[in-house]
Amino acid sequence: KPKVGRPSNAERAEKARIAAQQAAAAAARKKTAAADKALAEAKAAEEAAVAAINRAQEKASKAKANAEARLAAASSAQKTLALKPPPPGVPVYCYCRNISHGEMVGCDNDKCKYEWFHYGCVGLTAAPPGDIWYCPDCRRDPKTSDKPKKKT
């Protein structure tokens, strides 16, 4: 015969306990799913960061190799030119007393004994800033600094 009437206190307590367990299990599954998702996102972010670092290191390595190759080529060219004396009558410049080649900068002191300098011989890699430049010798000797000569 089916039960009729109101459930007993024990039955209500058991239903409440089962409902609470089910709610707790559902909440735990939800937290686990959220944690799994966060872990997956963190792993993806870590992989992306590692890939970006690897690309940056590879790019830096290539740039370093290119710079070293350019430096070696410039050094080799400089040594080759330094080994060969210039032909008679060809003007020489710079501390190295060699011919004009590559990028050069002119000293703005009219009394400078060298006049023009190879960038590498005076520690330059690009044109110096400003409109006036004095070589290291003329910068050390204020007596030789006179009015700047006009650039041509």
Image: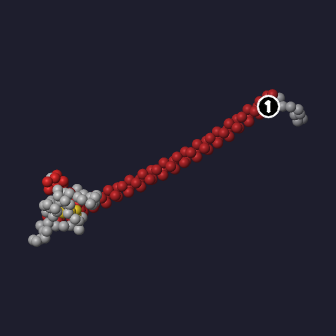
* Depth order, front residue of 29/61: 61
Badge 1: how crowded within 10 Å, few (<14), some, or many (20+)?
few
* Depth order, front residue of 44/107: 107
**Residue 26 in the image, given as x and y percentages of width and height:** 68, 40
Element assignment for label 1: helix
Which corner quadrant holds the N terminus? top right
Q: Is residue 9 left or right of residue 140?
A: right
- Residue 100, compared with residue 145, is above or below; it is below
Residue at point 62%, 41% (across, down)? 31
Residue placed furthest toward the left: 88
Q: Is residue 101 left or right of residue 23?
A: left
Render colour scheme: secondary structure
Residue at point 84%, 31% (across, down)? 7
Which corner quadrant holds the C terminus? bottom left
Q: Is residue 100 left or right of residue 50?
A: left
Q: How many numbered dots are placed on residues in this image?
A: 1
* Depth order, front residue of 124/4: 124
Question: Which residue position is annotated with label 1?
Answer: 12
**Residue 102 in the image, given as x and y percentages of width and height:** 23, 66
The kind of residue tagged 1 is: Arg
Residue at point 17%, 56% (across, down)? 145
**Residue 150 in the image, given as x and y percentages of width and height:** 22, 65
Q: Is residue 76 visible?
A: no
